[in-house]
Image (cartoon, rainbow, N blue to C red):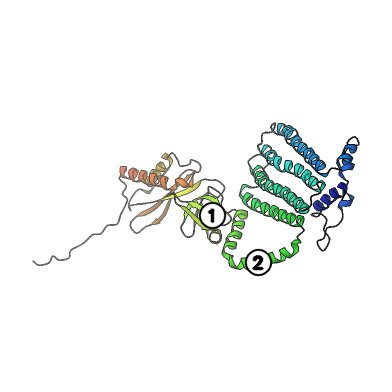
Amino acid sequence: MSNDNKIRAVQDTAGETMALGSQGEPVAMAEQLPTLDSLLPELLQPAWAFMSGYPLAAASATVLVFFMMALLLRFVVFRLLQGAAGLTNSAADDQILQILRKPLFNTVFLFGVTLAIALAELPWGEKFLIHAVLSFIVMSWLLASLKLTTIMLEAFSSDHRFKVIESRTVPLFDLTGKLLMILVGSYILLMIWGINPVGWLASAGIMGIAVGFAAKDTLGNLFSGFFIVADAPYKINDYITLDTGERGKVVAIGLRSTRLMTRGDVEITIPNGVIGAAKIVNESGGPSSSMRIGVPVGVAYGSDVDAVCELLTSVGEAHTETRSNPEPRIRMRAFGASSLDFELLCWIDKPEDKGRITHELLMGIYKTLGEHNIEIPYAKRDIYIKEMPQT
């Protein structure tokens, strides 16, 4: 086989991924592609015609030429692009160029290797080697695309004027994008090796049904994770309380589970299937990050209720970590069995400070009411002895 026909064979092999018939056989499209000798400058064509008679020399020259082209791409073109990227304030373009260096170098150099393999007229293994080299190129781009997905999502979700993706949906887009890239990469690899993926897809469908029944709980948590990310009933660093009593700060939202850090520094992992069906109280939600706390107070019957309201208001305003807008408020809630029931309402900035500030307000209320001789009633039992026993 002549060198031109060898080169066409490489082009046919690479073109299998784009030209398959209805039965999966390659379609002869590569014959219309130009040969290497037609791409060379007219000045170099006599030298190429001479080297064509020496397959190993032609293969070595081809590898050397494409290696020099790959080096030129890496050290000249990329240097210029990196210089232009350094003029921007974003670090994403620098990271993208750094990731693209390797797959572009591999693509240029390894394409030359495939041509060299065709030119070398190997006695065996030629097709296998070409397929292996093309597979390496695909894997190089697949790994780079997975990294690029993460960087692009971070760039489009960061806080700047080009923000187009909400931060809470980043995990959803990240997983979906990576799954699609893995599927596309796997499809291209199968096509390179001449494997018809239709049968594999049918087998995967049957296996998917079996796996779905065997891992229904895991899949339930997975789908619940998708809905939690999309619906966003809470986000990272929010304080939430579940209907089962768990309360803590959200430290991680995964596709299988959500993790809470309680005030006792205990991490709770809750499956998304459970948390998706639970009633969630988001203390950090609403129009602002502040929240209201209520401190119940009971005073004895006969107390001056106006004075009680003034004293409780002064306690709320005197605390350094309660908000002045809205200002503290007092509400009389009920006539209790042995007390007049009031509630001091204050707004705080951080839900995690609820316990500590409530403690400090209770201490202040007790001291203030004591200084003004306002009794805080407590349970009392009087025992009357109707008749003394006879001794």
Q: How many marks?
A: 2
Based on the displayed image, in which of its 4 quarters is residue 156 positioned?
top right
Residue 37 or 52: which is nearer the viewer?
52
Figure check: 197 above or below 248: below
Figure check: 104 above or below 331: above
Q: Position of residue 130 (x, y in %)?
A: 77, 50
Per the image, the residue denoted by label 2 is 207
Q: Tell whether 365 sits left or right of 100.
A: left
Residue 298 or 118: which is nearer the viewer?
118
Q: Position of residue 198 (x, y in %)?
A: 75, 63
Q: Amino acid at mark 2?
A: Met
User: Which label is found at residue 270?
Assistant: none
Per the image, the residue denoted by label 1 is 258
Q: Amino acid at mark 1?
A: Thr
Closer mark to the observer between disc 1 and disc 2? 2
Question: How many residues crowd around disc 2 within 10 Å: few (fewer than 14), some, or many (20 or more)?
Answer: few
Q: Tell whether 321 sits left or right of 178.
A: left
Q: Which type of secondary structure does the marked residue at label 1 adopt?
A: strand
Residue 54 or 196: which is nearer the viewer?
54
Q: Residue at x 55, y 48 (%)?
A: 236
Label whose residue precedes the other's in the sequence (1 or 2): 2
Figure check: 137 above or below 390: above
Q: Position of residue 213 (x, y in %)?
A: 60, 68
- Give how far apart the Cα atoms at labels 1 and 2 are: 29 Å
Q: Which type of secondary structure does the marked residue at label 2 adopt?
A: helix
| Quadrant of the snapshot with the C terminus | bottom left
Q: Position of residue 145 (x, y in %)?
A: 69, 47
Q: Tell whether 87 sits left or right of 62.
A: left
